[in-house]
Image (cartoon, rainbow, N blue to C red):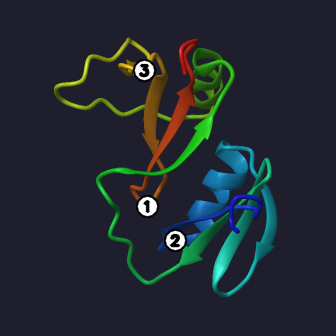
Amino acid sequence: MLHNSPLIAFVATSNSEEALRFYRGTLGLTLVEDSPFALVFSAGETTIRVQKVPQVASAQFTALGWAVQDIEKTIAWLTARGLAFERFPGMEQSDTGVWQSPSGASIAWFRDPDGNILSLTQHGQTE
């Protein structure tokens, strides 16, 4: 029943002004709503609700991710906007922070102002 329903993604912020600058300014997402409860953005056909909370306990795993056509071009665009990409011990990553998964996908990670881990994925030819 849910396979044709649009997906809504959730992440939290304890500083909505900073999150607004990041998601709208740095990532270039379209702001749909700024309510007392959440910042709501459009990302393609997905709605992202950045919930306004008193304190964020960021997870040590990916909270949101984007499938991109050209990961290196996207990394360059985001880096020019001041974003830094994460390095993880034990993972072989390129100079730009890209890890090649066993499936052939190229993946890179970055954090939002609240420490939530976000990712970019360029799918490989075999996926």
Which residue is labeled 2 in the image?
15
Which amino acid, by three-letter code, is at mark 2? Asn
Secondary structure beneath label 3: loop
Q: In the image, residue 24 lies at what x, y percent?
A: 72, 53
Outermost front residue: 1
Q: Quadrant of residue 86?
A: top left
For marks 2 and 1, the one nearer the N-term is: 2
Which residue is labeled 1 in the image?
114
For marks 1 and 3, the one nearer the N-term is: 3
Q: Residue at x 77, y 59 (%)?
A: 4
Q: Residue at x 66, y 62 (%)?
A: 20
For marks 2 and 3, the one nearer the N-term is: 2
Relative to 60, 20 lies left or right: right
Relative to 34, 90 lies left or right: left
Which residue is labeled 3 in the image?
103
- What distance separates the C-alpha of mark 2 from that of mark 3? 37 Å
Labels 1, 3: front one: 3
Relative to 92, 45 lies left or right: right
- What distance separates the C-alpha of mark 1 from that of mark 3? 30 Å
Q: Quadrant of the N terminus?
A: bottom right
Q: Residue at x 75, y 64 (%)?
A: 5
Which amino acid, by three-letter code, is at mark 3? Ser
Task: Report if the CB atoms under discs 2 and 3 are less than 8 Å apart.
Answer: no
Q: Quadrant of residue 3?
A: bottom right
- What distance separates the C-alpha of mark 2 from that of mark 1? 8 Å
Q: Residues within 10 Å of mark 3 (few under 14, many from 20)?
A: few
Q: Is residue 95 above or below residue 21?
A: above
Q: Residues within 10 Å of mark 1 (few under 14, many from 20)?
A: some
Q: In the image, residue 93 lies at what x, y percent?
A: 33, 17
Q: Is residue 121 above or below residue 46?
A: above
Task: Report if the CB atoms under discs 2 and 1 are less than 8 Å apart.
Answer: yes
